[in-house]
Amino acid sequence: MQHLQSLFDFLRAGITPFHAVAHAAALLEAAGFVRVEDADYWVLEPGKGYYTTRNNSSIIAWRIPEHAIGGWRLTASHSDSPGWRIKNTAVSSQGCVRLNVEGYGGMNMASWLDRPLTVAGRVMVREDAGIRARLVSIDRDLLVIPSLAIHMDRAVNDGHKYNPQIDMQPLYGPEGCRSLDSLLAETLGVAEDAILDRDLMLVTRQQPTRIGPEGELFLSPRIDDLECAATTLFGFLEASAETDSACGPVWAMLDNEEVGSGTRQGAQSTFLRDTLDRIMEAVPHSAQAAQRALANSLLLSADNAHANHPNFGEKADPANPVRLGGGVVLKVNASQKYTTNALSGALFREICRREQVPVQLFANRADLPGGSTLGNLQSHTLPIPMADIGLPQLGMHSAVETAAVADAEAMVKAVAGFYRIHLRALGDGWYDFG
């Protein structure tokens, strides 16, 4: 249970991708990491840690080795979760004021009904010398998406097809109520006309909480994928100063995975590759040394996996059960929607064996398609061995999800071991652990 409180703090703080990045940056700075900006000239010193952000919603951290960089150890997770993005802040309807929202990512819509919600995100504010991004969160129960009474939809329990334009628009207040812009300005301490633009989303007010007879499980919004983001960061911070003196440890949390990652801050972008190239140039190394480092690298794409559901066991591959509390998950897919193969899977399994961390194998039923994640998208720009891993959970893409305490601890231990390992590529498919 060593990291549970820190994980809960991350889940509480990371209410939007912008807030998740800000919280991660604070943890990195507390550990001595120095921020560098994309637009600045980088001067990097051996033995020191650095981080950079893009769009305020993606972040990459690394430590410069004491000797020439002989390889990279990387983990990548994502900062975003399915939810509702706000388009307009005041739409009148039937004597009420609604917000106008549209869906972001694939979600269980029904799970958002009849629960307290609020608004958070990023606001662009005019200042004397220009404009600046400010984070905002209205810390109160502010609005709700009310369901239609069963008296008016008697067949709702037989299955209802939710229309986001009709069913899922949130109630803000009665007509004539104080505007959301006014609340945002008050929260930020600025004039309303200083707010130039905004990236706002609905946020569930549910807080992380333990459940089960001994608190073995926990319930929280955004477990997918902030659980992986937090636990990989904890492992990175625990081990990054203890790595092989020629290994470059890197931790990344990227945005927009839930909508395909096709943005300048997503896994299909060049953000991670750009960062590695700039590190190699700043140290500096030759072009051949940079290619050798890539060949001696390994990336863990960390995104949560489905546990076997106690009510719907038939939805899982019967030959590959995944249990809550059963350990870290290694994900495989014949079509390479997950990047794990025999090589990367064996490397990860051996690391976990040495750390005494249990590993479970996840594969979709052959007749049920699965989604992809960061690894196969990142491989478009970063040609290194990768394994897709995650933690088992229930209720994925619900407004509130469920996972196991023991699995989070297992991930921290596995990732710390991954960063500490002395891994050397001696040839194609031939590795030495030192």
Image (cartoon, helix red, strand yellow):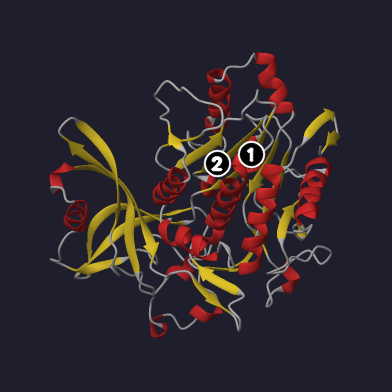
Q: Is residue 377 above or below residue 23?
A: above
Work out which quarter of the rendered image holds the N terminus and state it.
Answer: bottom right
Q: Is residue 119 above or below residue 167?
A: above
Q: Locate residue 58 relative to residue 389 in the image: left or right.
A: left
Picture residue at 25% right of the left edge, 55% below the top? 89
Q: Which residue is mark 2?
A: 252
State the separation of the CA atoms marked 1 and 2.
8 Å
Q: Locate residue 274 relative to residue 103 in the image: left or right.
A: right
Crowd around label 2: few <14 · some 14–19 · many ≥20 (10 Å) = many
Work out which quarter of the rendered image holds the C terminus and state it.
Answer: top right
* Residue 402, visible in the rendered structure: yes
Q: Is residue 62 above or below residue 146?
A: above
Q: Which residue is mark 1?
A: 74
Picture residue at 47% right of the left edge, 39% below the top? 33
Picture residue at 26% right of the left edge, 37% below the top? 132
* Residue 338, visible in the rendered structure: no
The kind of secondary structure element at disc 1 is: strand
Foreground residue among 301 and 276: 276
Residue 134 position within the rendered picture, expressed as x and y whole percent measured from the top left: 28, 45
Foreground residue among 200 and 125: 125
Q: Is residue 124 above or below residue 4?
A: above
